[in-house]
Image (cartoon, rainbow, N blue to C red):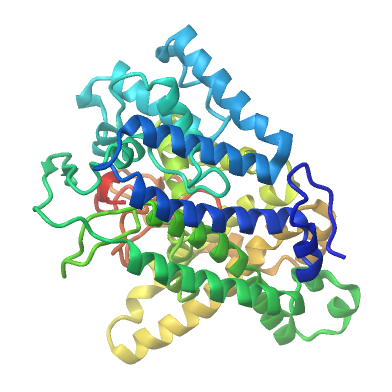
Amino acid sequence: MATTSTTGSTLLQPLSNAVQLPIDQVNFVVGQLSALLAAVWFRTYLHPSKTSSFIRHVVATLLGLYLALFCFGWYALHFLVQSGISYCIMIGMGVEAMHNPMMIITQKITSLAYEIHDGMFRKDEDLTPSQRYLAVRRMPSLLEYLSYNCNFMGILAGPLCSYKDYIIFIEGRSYHVAHSDKNGKEEPHCARAEPSPSAAVTQKLLVCGLSLLVHLTVSSFFPVEHNIDEHFRATASWPTKVIYLYVSLLAARPKYYFAWTLADAINNAAGFGFRGHDESGEARWDLISNLRIRQIEMSTSFKMFLDNWNIQTALWLKRVCYERATVSPTIQTFVLSAIWHGVYPGYYLTFLTGVLMTLAARVMRNNFRHYFIGSPQRKLLYDVVTWAVTQVAVSYTVVPFVLLSVKPSFAFYSSWNYCLHIAGILVLLLLPVKKTQRGKSTRENVQLSRSQKFDETEDSLGQNSFPTTNSVRSREAAPARPPSNQ
């Protein structure tokens, strides 16, 4: 019996028992599939050309609150209380005082807080191009605010989107709005017929199905916890430990692929997520996509892996923390990411290890990569080696994130004799650190990566944090595309 306590609906308990999954997971999947169907209906019958923004806001909000009640029961009051208190602060205290108190509440609330602050209390010339584009110039109505925070498309699994992009979608301007180039100048779209999301949704649902199948059939055979099994630690050879570490973390990723891709498909099915057309004229539906699976699995650097994982959270951390911090922005961003995730010590161990791994990887890259790009054969060898090292290092770093607690996390690292920690420290101590134009070391001169650099190659020098946390890269990197093209 796959029973577990839940404050949500128990209507699907028989299905939970049949598939041997906890009722809360069954409720989540059914809720998201229901949201997918609702999204198709929403786009078809409540299209902006057929109804008003008011109706779209009301329906999106009510359906979202219903899904929250179904999945979480009375815990869904948290959404209303949190949003209600925040809105009262906005109205009662004024938007100028709003952006600081709301910092750690939710991604959407803090994002909107800073966007209002940028739009109503800062001069345009003081804003970056992305801040200028996202700036909110008037106070949202209560309905707009609740719709943004509690709409059915994102209430269960997100992903995060900017308030401006959401309002543009609700008002039916997604296909006509002028987007900004890298200098902040607006470039109107060419006149085109409204694109259909059907192909994008179908492709993403196929990815969801495959990911769910892998999760249900493979992950149970390779539990991450087996890495700290006493017998395994005592008897396994080093090649076995390395291979199992990689395979177990590889098997743990499909559940994230399923959840994030389904959330993306739901938004697309409703017509949200359009990001313009590519060079061949094909519509791109990745405005709020949270990951790029092929790039993740084929990553040849920490940067490449982390630039393509939990993209919207990386953008959130960049916008609300890194760009605005005046002292130790990298440290502040990592701390905010850890606090946002929760209180488990494993998160902090992962983030600290991630900092060391990314800095060491960058120094290694700067010192050795140029020796291997002279011929295709050496470049291929370099790619194969860096792929293997990256996958093992990422797996090594993320184990505490999965194990959560201090004791099992240290048990894992001690079974590996902290070898990658030691290697990372030695790299930073013994190899020369490339100086930036400002004279700061790469250890200090890092910046959050913008996910809208969809076509960015791994040749860019950059830094990132870790899964569901921030992404960072060099200040010297080329300017990213504006948020409208994320």
User: What is the x, y in percent for residue 254?
Assistant: 59, 69
Which of 263 and 152 lies nearest the eye of the viewer? Answer: 152
State the residue at coordinates (60%, 68%): 253
Q: Residue furthest bottom?
A: 377
Asked where in the image residue 292 lies, by quadrant, the reply is: bottom left
Query: 305 and 75: which one is in front?
Result: 75
Q: How far across and down, in percent of the image, does residue 270 sit?
A: 38, 51
Residue at x-position 46% and y-position 84%? 384
Count the marks: how many? 0
The N terminus - image quarter: bottom right
Judge left or right: residue 5 versus residue 112: right
> Does residue 464 appear anywhere in the picture?
no
Where does residue 276 sit, x and y in percent of width and height? 22, 55
**Corner quadrant of residue 58:** top left
In the image, residue 152 above or below residue 307:
above
Answer left or right for 229 relative to 357. right
Q: Which residue appears at 32% of the width and 51% of the height? A: 486
In which image quadrant can residue 28 be found?
Answer: bottom right
- The residue located at (30%, 29%) in the rendering is 135
In this rendering, does residue 451 appear at all?
yes
Residue at the farthest right position: 231
For the residue pair 247 and 280, the one nearer the viewer reads as 280
Q: Is residue 370 above or below residue 405?
A: below
Percent of width and height locating residue 4: 84, 54
